[in-house]
Image: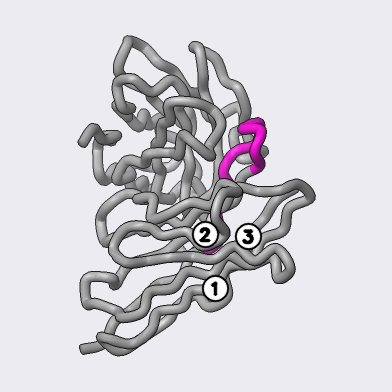
Amino acid sequence: AQSVTQLGSHVSVSEGALVLLRCNYSSSVPPYLFWYVQYPNQGLQLLLKYTSAATLVKGINGFEAEFKKSETSFHLTKPSAHMSDAAEYFCAVSDRSGNTPLVFGKGTRLSVIA
Amino acid sequence: EPEVTQTPSHQVTQMGQEVILRCVPISNHLYFYWYRQILGQKVEFLVSFYNNEISEKSEIFDDQFSVERPDGSNFTLKIRSTKLEDSAMYFCASSVNRGLGNSPLHFGNGTRLTVT
């Protein structure tokens, strides 16, 4: 069975500071990994995905994530936080066969302080 | 850009009542899903649907739940007799293919169900 663990239910950063949201996965087979973002009163929007090409994946809005097999991690980063980045961020995992559904973490709420 | 639409955005119902949550997936997508998120908890998979039948369901998706694609555009989730613990945000999603690497899920904005 696959799972993801997001460390920290709430992260607060100053505007312009580095954003680091942590995600560790557990999978017995090579996974696909995803980050989704949920803005207030909106659905889940795909930020980026890892599908075994480059280990450093760039997404929308300046976010990127690096797949580290040795650490079973897929942390999300952004060099400089913007007020509009305040949202809930979800890490998710699936296997490559498509035979298992997407499994989400609990989410991390990002607050950006002016 | 095409999007998944869900109605209503908020539904309040009394315990024991039936509710139907509605979704219009993206038109060329073939796989449809329902997820739910109880306040403060994980987004949990409920069911996937393809070719007019359930392809997979979780333990949560018991006999009180059902899904249907009544016409060519709508995809519905019915809860036959709601319980307090069914209160959650319900998300509909769709994808072109089943393999999520090249065909990620597109989610709707969700329906917040409140059971009183």
Q: Nearer the viewer, residue B5 or A23?
A: A23
Q: Are marks 1 and 2 in contact (CB under 8 Å)?
A: no
Q: Which residue is mark 1?
A: A22
User: Mark 1 and mark 2: span between their CA atoms?
Assistant: 9 Å
Precedes in sequence: disc 1 or disc 2: 1
Q: Which residue is mark 2?
A: A91
Which amino acid lies under the numbered mark 2 shown in the image of this protein? Cys
Vertical side of B93 occupied by B52: above or below: above
Number of other residues with Cα within 10 Å of mark 1, as a class: few under 14, some 14 to 19, many 20 or more: some
Q: Residue at x 38, y 84 (%)?
A: A18
Query: Do marks 1 and 2 share a chain?
Result: yes
Decide if residue B104 is in sight here: yes
Query: Do marks 3 and 1 share a chain?
Result: yes
Q: Which residues are magenta?
A: A95-106
Decide if residue B116 is in sight here: no
Determine whether the residue tagged by mark 2 lies in a helix, strand or loop. strand
Q: Quadrant of the C terminus of chain A?
A: bottom left
Q: Which residue is mark 3?
A: A4
Label 2 is found on which chain of the structure?
A: A
Determine whether the residue tagged by mark 1 lies in a helix, strand or loop. strand
Vertical side of B108 occupied by A107: above or below: below
Q: Residue at x 73, y 53 (%)?
A: A27
Residue B89 position, x and y percent, is: 39, 49
Residue B110 position, x and y percent, is: 33, 44
Q: Are marks 2 and 3 in contact (CB under 8 Å)?
A: yes
Residue A52 position, x and y percent, is: 60, 48
Which amino acid lies under the numbered mark 1 shown in the image of this protein? Arg
Q: Are marks 3 and 1 in contact (CB under 8 Å)?
A: no
User: Mark 3 and mark 1: span between their CA atoms?
Assistant: 10 Å
Vertical side of B58 occupied by B115: above or below: below
